[in-house]
Amino acid sequence: MTLPSPPLDASDSDASDSKGALTLTSFTADSPDLGWYVQNDNVMGGRSKGGFETRDQGELLFAGSTNTNGGGFSSIRTQPFRLDLSTYDGIRLRVKGDGRQYTLQLQTNALNRGYRVSYWAEFDTRDGEWSTVNIPFSSFYPQFRGFKLDGPELDTS
């Protein structure tokens, strides 16, 4: 996963590549631990299952099954951290998929009617093939509990 921005702690910014991007994690033993964890719909009574493992070759494998009868999501997330992305255009992922569509979610401090807003962008995968996915920040839309909102716009700072 590449985030085109330095982390909060500038001392970690030595991982920048020649194109001005920063590799946030390479899922290897020497890359930062972002505190990945599973969040499935059982937090609200659903029955989906999912999980992940990191592999020696620098991969994070996410797998599971989604039950759309009550809830309907399975996800992995990182612990919160802050990045200033205001001088960059988007996020790049290197993924090997199953041909399905996935959602990348960003969170900020933005509120709508007192509730925290998330920003979603969908991306497609190719079954069994590695691909590079570029997601411009302009593709992220605000949402709350699965409902698309008119705003606020994503503030990348």
Image (tube, rainbow, N blue to C red):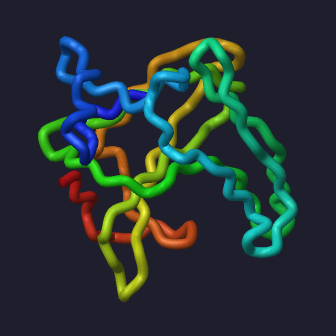
Residue under the point 37% across and 87% down: 114
Would residue 27 appear left or right of 128 to someone viewing this image?
left
| Residue 96 in the image: above or below residue 135 | above
> Which residue is nearer to you in this view: 109 or 131?
109
Name the residue rendered at 49%, 54% in the picture. 79
Q: Residue furthest bottom?
A: 113
- Residue 89 visible in the picture: no
Q: Nearer the viewer, residue 25 or 62?
A: 25
Q: Is residue 66 visible to us here?
A: yes
Percent x, y of residue 83: 27, 48
Work out whether residue 130 or residue 2 is closer to the camera in this orientation and state it: 2
- In this picture, residue 43 sits left or right of residue 60: right
Relative to 31, 81 lies left or right: left
Q: Quadrant of the C terminus?
A: bottom left
* Total marks placed: 0
Above or below 129: residue 109: below
> Residue 81 placed where, x, y %?
37, 53
Residue 156, compared with residue 151, is above or below; it is above
The quadrant holding residue 11 is top left
Q: Which residue in the rendered view is the most extreme toward the left?
A: 87
Q: In the image, residue 30 lies at what x, y percent? A: 47, 22
Q: Could you say which quadrant of the image residue 40 lies in?
A: bottom right
Where residue 93 appears, as percent x and y from the top left, is 45, 27
- At x 12%, y 39%, the residue is 87
Res 24 → quadrant: top left
Q: Residue at x 83, y 56 (%)?
A: 48
| Location of the N terminus (image quadrant) | top left
